[in-house]
Structure formats: C-alpha cells, structure tokens
Image (cartoon, rainbow, N blue to C red):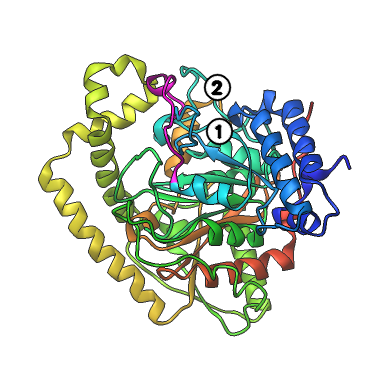
Amino acid sequence: MSDLHTLSLSEASTLIRDRKLSPVEYTRALVEHTERHDGKLNAFLRFTPEIALADAQRAETEIMAGGWRGPLHGVPYGLKDIVDYAGLPTTGHSAILKDSTAATDAFVTRKLRAAGGVFMGKLSTHEFAIGGPCFDLPWPPARNPWNRDHFCGGSSSGSGSATAAGFVPVAIGTDTGGSIRNPASMCGVTGMKPTYGYVSRRGVFPLAYSLDHVGPLTRTVRDNAIVLDLIAGHDPHDPGSVPRTGGGCASLLDRGVEGLRIGVVRHFYTRDLVADAEMSASIEQALAQLESLGAVVREVETLPLQQFAACNRTLLVSEAYAVHERWLRERPQDYGDLTRERLFPGAFVSAAEYVNAARMRLKMAAAFNSLFDDVDVVVTASAHDPACRIDDPKQVEYTYARQARAPFNLTGNPALALPTGFSAGGLPLGMQIVGRPFGEATIYRVAQAYEAATGWTKRQPVLQA
C-alpha cells in the first residue's frame, strides 16, 4: 500500500490488531515517506529508522503470538526534543545541549514504550521551547507541510509538521503558552493541552514550572483521546502531578452534542484582539455547525485577553530565566539571538511583580472557571491568523502574539485546538475548545461531533518530493 502514511492511529491500530497490517510494513512505509519528504520540512531533528524498525519487529512478533497491548502497539510516534529518550541526546534544539545524552526515559516516553509504540525519532522544537523559527542554530527550523515557505507554529514545531505530513500519526509536544495548540492550528491537526498536572513532566526539559504541560498532537480527535488516555496518570516524582489516574478521555466520543451548553468567548477574537476575517468566519461557521447538531450556543465573557497575556508573560519569563540563569551568564553566545532576546527580560522582573502575577493568576482562574456554572465547554480562537511566511521575522513575531491560548496555561484548564477549514490561500484555520479542570472527555465529545460533521481532518497536504 502506497498510502499507509494517510492512516489515522485508530485505522492503523485496528488493521494491526486484526493482523491485516504488519507493524513492520507500516513502519517501513512511514520511514520511506519521511526519507522522501522531510528534507524539505525538517520536522525531525534526529530521525531513528533503525530503532523504529526494531520496535516494529518486536511488536509484530508479540502480536502474532497473541500479545496485542492496545491501540499504540506497533504504531509509530515522535517526541519533541525536550522529552528524554534513554540513550539519545535531548538537545532542546540548542548548541548548549547538542552533546547531551538522556540517562533515562521521560515518564511519557516510558508510557509510550510500555504501550508497544514504535519510536521514529526526536522532533524539532524552538530552542528550549521559547525561541522562534531561528536560522542561527545547529539545526534548521521545521516548516509547514501545507506550504513549506510558511511557519508551522511552535514551539512544538516538528510535532505539528510531522503529524500533518504523515510522518507519524501521533507526536508528543509541550505547552507553556500555547506550544501544542499553535502548531496544531498552523498545521491543521488536533492538539490537546490537558489539565495541569494530568500528564507528568518528569524527564521533560522545563520552560516554566508552573505553566508547563505535556500533551499529544494527532490528525484526529479520536486518536488524540486514545493517546491522552495512554500517557496520563499520577507520577509521585513530578511535584506538579495530580493524584489522579488516567483514562476515560475517550469515553464520551460518540455521544454527540445534543443539549450540551457551549459558551463562546467571542471578545477574545472580535474585540480584545481582532482576528483575521477568515479565521473569525471559520469559528462562527463551526459554532453554527455545533448548534445545528443540537448544542445550545451562547456568548459569555471573562477578563480581557490582554490581562491574561500580561500575567502569563510575567510568570513565564521569570521562571524561564531562573532555569537558564547560569548558562545565560556563562555562555550567552551559545543561544540563538531570538532565544536570548526572549529569556533576558526575566532578569528584570521583580519579586513583587512575580508574586502579584501569581496572586492575580488565582483570581483569573476563579473568574474563568465560574463560567462552567452555566456552560459545559467554552469555544474561542486559538490562533488569530493563518500561518505567515517563515522567512519574515517581523510577521512571525506579530502573529505569534496574536493568540488566545495563554489564558489556559494560567488557569490550568484543558484546551484543544482543532481545524475549522482552510484560508483562501490553502492554509489551515482552527478554533479552541476549553473545558473545566479534568473535563477532557467533554471537550473530545464536542470536538468529535464537529469533526464527524465536517471532515476537515480527512484533507491532508500534498507533499512535493
């Protein structure tokens, strides 16, 4: 089969379970597809076909012996290169760590390996998950499969690009101010930032301890729920991990939205920051679609987007500077220019400013969560614009800040980005669905109903060899 790279995780898993598809055949097809096309996309920072084929052979032997482990068994995945895989470097896409080697697996890596996943390699990121698409680093930035001249989002840039391009059906990313949902929006895939503490961050290089989340990017909603069920769970070695078992995210997928109450935070994209007209229109069309499926849609309001952004920025730059302070003092020249530019402001945030931001964060979270007294989920924008050109740094910086993702790193609520169509230029458009803490199953329920009614995820980019 020449189109195995188009299979969703669920489709591939069913074929593998029923012994209609060999994990080795499937993996070899994805390896060949990646080798043919990634030279123009740079999604992988470290491609590991030899590990992948060994994992696939092991999975095939186990499955043929009747030892199917579950939906990821024999299915390829990739890791953002701030996530540890034992024996391989975790570079953070930076010269500073280019010679590092992880001694142990990250918690999430261990979960994926235990599920029988096939490891395809480490994926590009923005430097230490805070830089941008820089051209002064040891490796080039990832590009958008829909148009390689355009930005693929970040900081989980390779994760979004690889998933959209069909190199892997699932990739792991991280999200501190929107870094899973941004590439999901730019690349037309589905990306979940789960509830804070629902997925362990042990073995993941930190950006900002109180804001960091780990989550999956996939092409479909169903795949995303399946993977989150696999990687979630309490980890006593992560201080931020909640004492709660994983599972149940996929439990409501096929129940539809009849009677569900959807609140729209429209002011985030029509008043606080006015979104691109095509992006706004796609969100409104999505809301109309959900209403036609039986949901009750009404507008709700919370604090202005700019207040959330300012609070997030204060906490993020302070905590990021704390992580990098020694290297910034001893070897600042080894950072990319943009990364230094984004890290140094943290040196000038006072203790009082940080404490006041932390106090304000609690008030913001309480105000936002009060919305769930009257609605089941909230819908708003993710990105305010389609992807811009990757070689226009001013436009990249401008559009990067135009987003409504950072509020939910502050509040810790689960938030999912998913596609809502395409611009006139053929670039993905998207929206964001947000739930109450640990309300991932309801978010997936709404997203699945919308995806099934529209079929946007069936459209995939045509890659030029």
Q: Residue at x 72, y 31 (%)?
A: 34
Q: Is residue 105 magenta?
A: yes
- Residue 140: numbered disc: 2
Q: Residue at x 22, y 36 (%)?
A: 322
Q: Is residue 359 magenta?
A: no
The answer to which of marks 1 and 2 sits earlier in the sequence is: 1
Q: Residue at x 75, y 46 (%)?
A: 61
Nearer the observer, disc 1 or disc 2? 1
- Residue 122: numbered disc: 1
Residue 292 to residue 13: above or below = below
Question: What is the distance, in whole Å, between disc 1 and disc 2 at their CAs?
Answer: 14 Å
The one nearer the camera, 245 or 311, is 245
Q: Which residues are magenta?
A: 92-106
Q: Residue at x 68, y 23 (%)?
A: 39
Residue occupying the far front of the picture: 65
Q: Is residue 173 left or right of residue 362?
A: right
Q: Give the percent coordinates (x, y) of residue 258.
A: 63, 83
Q: Amino acid at mark 1?
A: Lys
Q: Residues within 10 Å of mark 2 (few under 14, many from 20)?
A: some
